[in-house]
Image: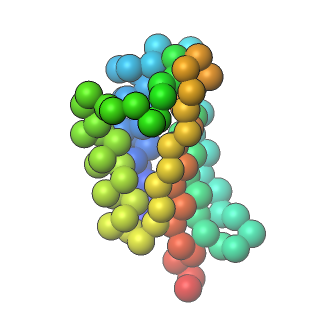
């Protein structure tokens, strides 16, 4: 799970740098009250319309696939001018 989270975080940061022109990028990994491990990668870049077709969505697809491989979920929220947040939730390793 740690390796999957590392690669997802790396891809999220690289996408932000490549496409969003952020001044700040935050990465947060925490265990929530249910014991799930939650990774969030957030930036204050240009953002994008998540419902619009993506020209080159390879990075997003890879992050989604890595989350699935680990039994987790992947979501992305963004809007123009508001930045982007990627959230990946993995089930507790203790289950």
| Identity of the residue drawn at 33% across and 58% down | 66
- Exactly how many numbered labels are in the figure? 0
| Identity of the residue drawn at 54% across and 49% down | 87
Q: What quarter of the picture does the N terminus occupy?
A: bottom left
Residue 34 is left or right of residue 5, and the answer is right
Up/down of 82 relative to 12, above or below: above
Corner quadrant of residue 67 = bottom left
Estimate the x, y position of residue 41 in percent, counting from the top left: 54, 40
Corner quadrant of residue 31 = bottom right
Q: What quarter of the picture does the C terminus occupy?
A: bottom right
Up/down of 81 relative to 26, above or below: above
Estimate the x, y position of residue 19 in percent, counting from the top left: 38, 20
Nearest the camera: 79 or 4? 79
Residue 55 at least partly seen? yes
Residue 29 is left or right of residue 74, and the answer is right
Residue 3 at least partly seen? no
Q: Residue furthest front?
A: 52
Nearest the camera: 92 or 74? 74
| Identity of the residue drawn at 31% across and 57% down | 65
Estimate the x, y position of residue 6 in percent, counting from the top left: 41, 49
Estimate the x, y position of residue 34 in percent, counting from the top left: 70, 73
Residue 25 is left or right of residue 72, and the answer is right
Q: Residue furthest right?
A: 33
| Identity of the residue drawn at 59% across and 58% down | 38
Corner quadrant of residue 89 = bottom right
Colour option used = rainbow
Residue 73 is left or right of residue 7, and the answer is right
Q: Residue furthest bottom?
A: 95
């Amino acid at each position: 799970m740690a390796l999957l989270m590392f690669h997802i975080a790396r891809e999220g940061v690289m996408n932000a740098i490549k496409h969003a022109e952020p001044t700040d990028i935050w990465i947060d990994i925490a265990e929530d009250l249910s014991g799930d491990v939650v990774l969030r990668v957030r930036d204050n870049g240009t953002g994008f319309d998540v419902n619009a077709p993506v020209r080159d969505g390879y990075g997003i697809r890879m992050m989604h696939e890595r989350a699935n491989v680990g039994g987790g979920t992947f979501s992305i929220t963004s809007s123009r001018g508001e930045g982007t947040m990627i959230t990946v939730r993995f089930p507790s390793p203790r289950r």
